[in-house]
Image (cartoon, grey):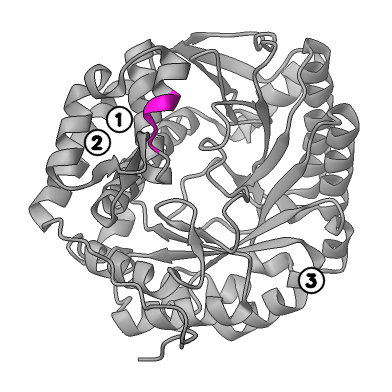
Amino acid sequence: MSSIILPDSVQPYNANITTPDWMISGMEKVMQFYVDRNLRLDTVSAEMMPNPIEGKKYMLYAHVPFCHTLCSFCTFHRFLFKEDKARAYFISLRKEMDMVKALGYDFESMYIGGGTTTVLEDELARTIEHAKKLFPSIKEVSCESDPQHLDSPGFKQLEGLVDRMSIGVQSFNDDILAMTDRIEKFGSGQQTFDKIMAAKELFPIINVDLIFGFRGQTDEVIQHDLDMASKLDPRQITTYPLMITHQTRKSVKGKLAAPQGDMARQYRQILNSLNGQYNQLSAWAFGKANDEGFDEYVIDFDEYLGVGSGSFSFLNDTLYVNTFSLRKYQERIANGQMGVDQQKNYGRKEVMQYRFLLGMFSGRLSRKYFRETFGVNLDTALFKEMTSMKAIGAIKNDPTDPDNLIVTDNGKMMGLLMMKEFYSGMDNVRAQLRKPLKACDM
């Protein structure tokens, strides 16, 4: 097994995860209960986003729902790429941004997700330029790509426009890539490594996305992935657990997913390998600096507005959902309407539980935040949540700051599980919203 040699001044990290398998399974069941209860499709129709509230900070999300190939384990909102539809879509995306501007919004950050955002680099560049012109407060633009586009001639158009490029590697191991049908689409692990090395100078921040929890992903395979990522020396590395949703479970679980009991051991290995080289930004994100944005933008922004087909917004304790029909989205924009189609309001207790989840996941659980945001005492307002996390050693009081709570390695494990189940629930919602779509909607 290969390993990164740490400088003499850096002490090797020894993750203290003592959570037994039965407790991990129990936490997953609890999270599944809350996710199923709170992420139900009991929405009402919506026609327009609300106006911004003075003093709040907002993040702009833009969704690009096109991919050249569709990965079997992915349930994000995406369609097979067709150039004419994609170019028309980018034009509509910019028009929807105009409508957002007319409502009075400005944004501090922009995140572009997919799909594959870089299917048409020239259109993406125009869209980013348009957003920066409309919303002059944007300080950082984050974008996603797969390895296929890194060496395309048009990729360099994004230099100077994208501050953070997140690249979906998943694994550098050719057997894992073949099992997930990625090696023919994106090339071998070494080819991906070489492409990232050549492209990393284009952007201030490169993030390498890895996934653990694949069947056959031994400790040696995971360590090789971590070592390859570290050799690239990116500003950020993200290590997602494989997420199996209700929609993918039948076709994927037996073929791709490792036994559930492997997760804690694999996560311990990741913590031991990356802590010391990187600062831990969240349960699964690691960065060279503590103040950089990363994929889970919901941590840094309580409020965000989404444009594009299939995007979500969370504004004033209300979830807004844009239509998942590509045809309907284009028709709405052409008629001068925004893409929003549905909305669901959440009560204060539900929002507090959501913020508690994010605090556990990000390691930023703060009594002061709950006091200032909700006017409550965290220990009593979320008594069950706080008591259970303290009982399993997931959180402890910070002796230097009574307002701060320290999320332990057990807590990081819990935060990872909680966010994994939350995202799996969101994927289930996406799959249900896509299910009624007909050929004419795509």
Q: Where is residue 72 shown, x and y percent of the image? A: 45, 57
Tag 2 near tag 1, CB within 8 Å: yes
Q: Where is residue 42 shown, x and y percent of the image? A: 38, 14
Q: Where is residue 124 shown, x and y percent of the image? A: 81, 47
Q: Please give the name of the residue rendered at 76% of the width and 53% of the height, measured from the top-left corner.
A: 163
Label 2 to label 1: alpha-carbon separation: 6 Å
| Range drawn in magenta | 365-369
- How crowded is the residue under tag 2: few (<14 C-alpha within 10 Å), some, or many (20+)? many
Location of mark 2 (residue)? 31
- How crowded is the residue under tag 1: few (<14 C-alpha within 10 Å), some, or many (20+)? some
Q: Please give the name of the residue rendered at 46% of the width and 13% of the height, measured from the top-left corner.
A: 344
Q: Say which mark, if any, is on residue 35.
A: 1
Residue type, numbered disc 2: Met
Q: What is the quadrant of the N terminus in the image?
A: bottom left
Q: Is 378 or 434 nearer to us in this picture?
A: 378
Residue type, numbered disc 1: Val
Residue positioned most to the left = 22
Tag 2 near tag 3, CB within 8 Å: no
Q: Please give the name of the residue rendered at 71% of the width and 38% of the height, measured from the top-left corner.
A: 110
